[in-house]
Amino acid sequence: MEGLTLVLPRERIPVLIGTNGAVKSEIEESFGVMLDIDSGEGVVRISPREGRGDPVNLLRARDAVMAIGRGFSPDKALSLRDEDMMLDIIDLREVLGKNENQIRRVKGRVIGERGKMRRAIEEATGAKVSIYGHTIAMIGDYESITFAREAVEMLIKGRQHSTVYKFLSARRRAMKRMGPGGARGG
């Protein structure tokens, strides 16, 4: 499989590289890929390492690099090594157009006062949420991402915070009833 090319915000490139290249090396080792990073342009080329050309690992490496580019810490991005974890990104420009005031307003709604709404989404769903630039990104398993996305979409559509809190509260109660592992037996 051929390599992949991504463009990251230039200010996120140092995070991708890490101190003395530690993050870059960990991504390369974890996913069996090579990263070629152009710091000036923010271009990252991901290619399979010789003898380790698993396309799934290439895509997982892409997601980890994208997660860092969307504001996640390297530790959270590297959780994508787990095959049950996935990255989901909502591009607010695709939903709202290029109106910066509207994008800023929606980002503020998702973050909430002192980060309260974002924390509530993370606690209720188990997904990690990053609001960066014009995107809202989430890392979690399929079920976590599904519910986190639903909560975020409710906020984008203008639903009241109280409605979203009720949705999240019901979600949290359902998770507790199901117990560890999330799925009900029988």
Image (cartoon, rainbow, N blue to C red):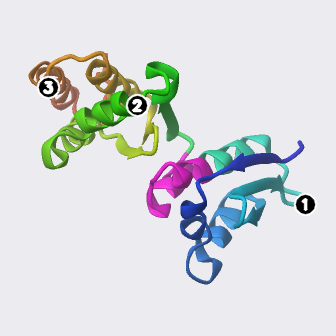
**Amino acid type assigned to the residue bearing label 2 in the image:** Ile
How far across and down, in percent of the image, does residue 72 sit? 45, 54
Kindly identify which residue carries mark 3. Answer: 161
CA distance for labels 2 and 1? 33 Å
Q: Which secondary structure class fits the magenta region best?
A: helix
Q: Which residues are magenta?
A: 64-82
| Quadrant for the C terminus in the image | top left
Residue under label 2:
145
The residue lying at 28 percent from left, 18 percent from top is 154
Does 25 sit above or below residue 138?
below
Within-10-Å neighbours for mark 3: few <14, some 14–19, many 20+: some
Q: Which residue is mark 1?
A: 50
At which x and y percent is residue 151? 28, 24
SS state under label 3:
helix
- Is 65 covered by the magenta stretch? yes
Task: Tell me how far mark 3 sits from mark 2, CA to CA.
Answer: 19 Å
Circle 2 crowding by C-alpha within 10 Å: few under 14, some 14–19, many from 20: many
- For discs 3 and 2, the disc positioned in front in the rendered view: 3
Q: CA distance from mark 1 to mark 3?
A: 50 Å
